[in-house]
């Protein structure tokens, strides 16, 4: 790991690490998108099933935020420690992360099952949606330990330069899910319960692969027992807490949108618009997950070179990660503005739903190039442990979105609420660039040079 990172050019490393991690997230997307495709096409209850998954999504994403909190925090600490030549601390990072993921999984499972009815109604479920949302949510929660452990520990595979192996772990789960979904949903006529069961089984397959790789493969740092430390756990959380809170805030944004659509649209129109929003969020998974895959795969470059005190290579990492993110998100921007209906028809047979959602999607995605700026700079700073810089520039964009969703229905038609994302992405990216080059970059240079 150290030899390759010191001798290989940053552009080559960015593409070597970023593209497999991006592709891994494409396959990871299949978990939710494949579920929604099959559920949305169920005769009679498809729209309710799709809306129910949309209702559950923020809570389930919030739960997986624990995996990234520990995984990103622990793998960043490991990479920084390797860059500094501190092998013992690197070993502490992975061992403590594994223990934390197991403990968090148990606690989350118990609490989520105890309060599931309250959670689902808070997320915008109505009486018509609750039976579907409850069935999906309950089964999914029972697989929390597989989900968190597989996702969290996979970060340690990526952080040691094994981008292809990290991708394979996700591919395994995605393929299993895609095969099992039609069997359980249609063949066994299990509907949303079948989709949830297929997802849990596939996540278990991913977890088994990740654990086997980290235990058996000859790596710079293998997972093991011992060296547990409250101080190390605290350092992991101090780095990873940023991604956790940002994920929670992202989910609050989805919840707020659903709540506003129900409030201003009423029971019938509200359910229809929530179903449209669920399809839009499926497209945004295509935006967000692979985009974050790039920055997650390349995060070890920021961590390692920051730990080694190499300012030039850290700045090069920002440059080329931003370039790769812009290329990817630029392609999605063109597709969302030219052929949005092609994507929407994957999820719905209703011409009315397709027409509504295609228009909403075009509005929602106008500013997604700004997301590339956010990911490159926010995630890069996070990987370096610079939370005091990363959090404000990310928080600004989120708050702007929340304000738009909260107040746009008061001053314009309800469908224009979908412009909230474009407004926050464009303004937020300009804010991020200004703050980084005017304030953050000079401080990093003084610290590292």
Image (spheres, rainbow, N blue to C red):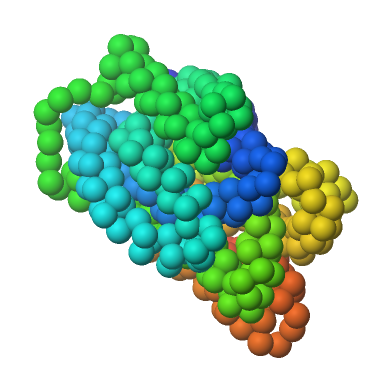
Q: Does 125 sit left or right of 88 as displayed? A: right
Q: Nearer the viewer, residue 411 or 309?
A: 411
Q: Is residue 282 visible?
A: no
**Residue 356: x, y in percent?**
79, 61
Q: Is residue 444 above or below residue 411?
A: above
With respect to residue 142, does 126 lie above or below? below
Q: Looking at the picture, how far across and down is residue 447, in whole percent?
A: 38, 55
Residue at 42% of width from left, 22% of height from top?
A: 205
Q: Is residue 320 above or below residue 17?
A: below
State the image coordinates of residue 161 (x, y, percent, origin top left). 46, 25
Report the residue that reaches farthest toward the bottom. 411
Seen in the image, is 56 located left or right of residue 226? right
Q: Quadrant of the N terminus?
A: top left
Is residue 176 found left or right of 373 in the rendered image? left
Using the rendered image of the protein, determine whether residue 55 is visible from the camera's viewpoint. Answer: yes
Q: Nearer the viewer, residue 447 or 393?
A: 393
Q: Residue at x 75, y 80 (%)?
A: 413
Left or right placement of residue 333 versus residue 217 in this view: right
Residue visible at 68% across and 64% down in the picture:
273
């Amino acid at each position: 790991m150290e030899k390759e990172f010191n001798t290989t050019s940053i552009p080559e490393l960015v593409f070597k690490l970023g593209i497999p991690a991006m592709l891994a997230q494409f396959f990871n997307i299949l978990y939710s998108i494949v579920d929604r495709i099959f559920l949305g096409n169920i005769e009679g209850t498809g729209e309710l099933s799709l809306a129910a998954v949309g209702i559950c999504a923020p809570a389930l994403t919030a739960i997986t935020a624990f995996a990234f909190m520990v995984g990103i925090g622990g793998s960043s600490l490991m990479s920084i420690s390797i860059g500094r030549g501190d092998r013992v601390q690197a070993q502490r990072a992975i061992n403590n992360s594994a223990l934390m993921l197991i403990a968090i999984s148990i606690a989350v499972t118990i609490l989520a099952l105890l309060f599931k009815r309250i959670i689902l109604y808070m997320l915008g479920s109505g009486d018509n949606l609750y039976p579907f949302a409850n069935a999906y949510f309950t089964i999914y929660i029972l697989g929390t330990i597989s989900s968190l452990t597989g996702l969290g520990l996979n970060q340690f595979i990526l952080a040691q330069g094994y981008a292809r192996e990290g991708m394979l772990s996700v591919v395994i789960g995605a393929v299993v899910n895609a095969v099992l979904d039609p069997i359980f949903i249609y063949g066994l006529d299990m509907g949303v319960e079948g989709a949830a069961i297929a997802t849990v089984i596939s996540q278990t397959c991913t977890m088994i692969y990740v654990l086997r790789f980290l235990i058996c493969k000859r790596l710079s740092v293998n997972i093991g027992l011992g060296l547990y430390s409250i101080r190390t756990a605290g350092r992991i959380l101090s780095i990873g807490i940023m991604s956790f809170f940002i994920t929670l805030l992202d989910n609050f944004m989805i919840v707020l949108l659903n709540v506003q659509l129900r409030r201003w649209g009423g029971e019938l129109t509200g359910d229809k618009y929530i179903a449209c929003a669920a399809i839009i969020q499926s497209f945004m998974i295509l935006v967000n997950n692979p985009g974050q895959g790039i920055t997650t795969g390349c995060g070890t470059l920021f961590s390692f070179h920051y730990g080694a005190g190499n300012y030039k290579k850290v700045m090069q990492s920002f440059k080329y990660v931003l370039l790769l993110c812009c290329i990817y998100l630029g392609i999605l921007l063109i597709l969302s503005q030219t052929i949005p209906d092609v994507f929407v028809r994957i999820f719905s047979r209703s011409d009315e739903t397709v027409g509504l959602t295609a228009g909403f999607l075009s509005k929602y995605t106008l500013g997604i190039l700004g997301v590339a700026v956010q990911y490159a700079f926010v995630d890069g700073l996070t990987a370096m442990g610079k939370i005091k810089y990363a959090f404000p520039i990310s928080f600004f964009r989120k708050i702007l979105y929340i304000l738009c969703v909260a107040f746009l229905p008061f001053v314009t038609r309800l469908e224009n609420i979908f412009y909230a994302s474009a407004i926050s992405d464009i303004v937020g990216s300009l804010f991020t660039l200004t703050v980084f080059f005017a304030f953050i970059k000079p401080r990093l240079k003084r610290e590292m040079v």
